[in-house]
Image: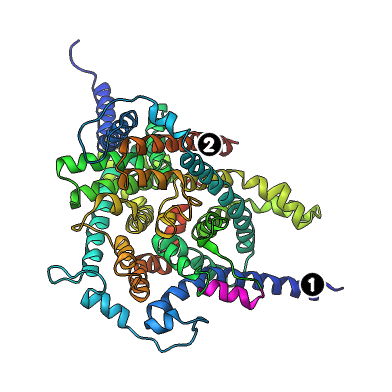
Amino acid sequence: MNNTPNKLLKTALRYAAYLALLFVILFPLYWILTMSLKNFKDIIAYPPRFLFTPTFDNYKQILFNGGSFSDLQGIPEFLRYVINSSITTFSAVALGLVLGLPAAYVLGRENSKANDRIAGNFMSYRFAPELVVILPLYSIYKKIGFYDTFPGMILVHQLITLPLIIWIMRGFFREVPKEMEEAASMDGANHWVIFFRIMLPIVKSGIGSAMIISFVFSWNNLLFGLVMSGGATMPVTMGILQAMTFDQIKWGEMAASAVISSIPGIIIAIFAQRFLVKGLTMGAVK
Amino acid sequence: MKTPNPLHHFVDNEKFIKRLMLMPAVLVLIGIMIPFLIGVATSLTDKKLYTGNFNFIFLSNYINNFKDPVFLTSLGNTLAYVIMAILMQLPLAILAALLLDIPSRIRGFMRSVLVFPLLIPPIVSSLMWKTMMQPNSGVLNYLLSKLGIGPFPWLTSVDTALFSLVVIDTWVYLPFITIILLSGLQSLPQDILEAAQVDGASPIRTFFAIKLRWLKSSILLVLLFRVCDSLKAFELIYSTTRGGPLNASRTLNIMAYEEAFRWSSIGKAMSILFTLWILAYIASTFLMREWNKSGIE
C-alpha cells in the first residue's frame, strides 16, 4: 500500500548518498583547482572566497618565468621537472613491458611451485617498504655514478613498474583459453612465436591496462625522486615540494604545479577508466 | 642409438625458451635482492652515510632501537595508522560498494569520478588537504563552523595529527578499495540473490549471509594491499607533517628516512627499515596465503 512513497524515499536516500560521495571526492579537487586560479589576496582571504576573478598568473609564472623555482639554462625549472618525469616514466614503463611481458606469460601459463615462488617474490616488492632497497641502492649509485642519472632513475622505477606489470599481465595471460596455445603448438610453433603472434594480440587490452596503471604510479611517485635525484633528473612531484620550501610557501604556484602534475592521471580517469578498473581488479575476483 | 630423440629435443627446447623469457625479469629480481642484502648487512654496522669506515656492531642497532622512546613511539604510530586506516576505510568502502552496486543511471559516472583520487599524485592530495586543514584559515574548519562544529586543530596538534593523516589516507585509497569490492560484488551469481529474494530474506540478512561471505576473497585482497601500504606510508606523512608535531605522526618509515638523510646514520636507518620489512613480510605472507585459500573454496 505504502509501497510507492517507500520506494521514493529509498531513491531519495540513494541520491543523497551519491551526492555526499561526489562532494567528498570532488570538493578537494575543486579547491586546489580554484586555488591555482586565484591571486595571492584571494588565497589567503578568510572567510575563504568561493567567488573570485580567475587569473592564470600562477600558471604563467611557473611555465614561462620559472616562478619561485630557480631558472637554470634558459628552460623554466618547472618545465624541466615535467620533461624529467616524462623521460623517466615513459622509459620505465617501456622497460617494464619488455622485461615483464615475457615473464608474465611464462608465470601465467605454467603453474609450478618454482614459478609461483618467483611470482610471489615479485609481488613481495610491491608490499615491502621501498626504502629497504633504495637506501642501500643510494650508496651504490653514488659510488658507481648512477645517482641523479636517467638510467639510474629508470632502473629504480622498475620497483614500481615491473611488479605491477607482472601481476596484472599474469592475470590476463591466465584468462586466455588453453586451446589457443595448444592449436598453435600442434602446428609446431614454439613459445616465442606463440607469445608474439598469438598471445600478445589477445591480451592487447590487458597491456593497455598494465601500461596505464604502471604509468600513473610511476609518474605519481615522490620517494624515488627524493632519494635518487639531484638537480638533473628531479621529477615533477619534487617540483611541487620545491614550491613549498622556497622563500616561504607560494600557495598559488604550488597549486598550479599540483594541477599540472595531476593532468596525466585526470586524463586517464576520464578516458581510460575501463582499462584502469579491469587492471586494478585483475586477480581480485576469481 | 646416438641420434637424439626429436621429440625430446623439442621439449627441451621449449623449456629453454621459457627460461629465456623469464630470465631478464629474474635478473632484475636478483638486482633488487643485492641492495636489499647489503642493506641488511648495513643494519648490523654503525655506518654513516658519507663516510667509508664502519664497525660491525651486530644487533646493537636493534637493541638500542627498542630502548629508544622515539622508535617505540614510531612503532606505535605505525601500527595505530594501519589499524585506524583499516577500521575507517573498510566499512566505508563496503557501504560505497553496496551503493554503487545498485543499478542506476549515474552509476557509470560515479565510478569514473571515484577513481580520481587514486590517479593524482599522493603529494598533491596531501598538500591539497594540508591547505584545507589549516586550523585558522582553512576551508575545512570554515565549512565545519557553518555546521556549528568548532575549530579542529587537524595536523597541528599532537592529539589529532595522526588521525588527520588517516583522513587524508582514506580520501586517497577509499576509491581503490571500493573498486575491488564492487567488482567482487558484481561477480556474485544472480541466481543466489534471486533465491534469497524468493525466500524473503531482508536486505540486511542478504548482506550478512550472502554478500559479505562472497566478498571474503576481495576483502582479504584489500587487507593485503592496505595493511602493507599503510605500514610503509611515506609520501602523505612526509609532505604534510614530516612526523611532527612532537613525533605525533612519526612512523618507522619516516624515522628511517630522517635517520639516514638528516643524521646520516644509515646503519641505524637500515635496522629500522628491516624491522618494518619484517612486519610487512609477516602481514603480506599471512594475508596472501589466506587470500589464495579463499580463492580455491
The image quadrant of residue B240 is bottom left
Relative height, residue A279 to residue B296 (above, below): below
The verdict on residue B219 being magenta is: no
Residue B212 image point, x, y percent: 67, 48
Residue at (66, 54) in percent of width and height: B190
Asked whether residue A189 appears in the rendered view, the answer is: no
Query: Seen from this angle, which residue lies furthest left?
Result: A73
Estimate the x, y position of residue A91 in percent, counting from the top left: 23, 54
Asked whether A279 or A178 is in front, the reply is A279
Q: Which residue is mark 1?
A: A6
Indicate whether B72 appears above or below A49: above
**Which amino acid, mark 1?**
Asn
Q: Residue B292 shows which numbered tag?
A: 2
Q: Position of residue A115 (x, y in %)?
A: 38, 31
**Outermost residue to the top:** B1
The residue furthest bottom is A53
User: Which chain does tag 2 point to?
Assistant: B
Q: Secondary structure at mark 1?
A: helix
- The secondary structure type at the circle numbered 2 is helix
Residue A23: % across, % down: 56, 72
Q: In this orientation, which residue lies closer to the viewer: A208 or A157?
A: A157
Residue range of the region highlighted in magenta in the rendering: B138-148
Question: How is the protein colored in the picture?
Answer: rainbow
Q: Residues within 10 Å of mark 2 (few under 14, many from 20)?
A: some
- Which residue: 46% across, 63% down? B117
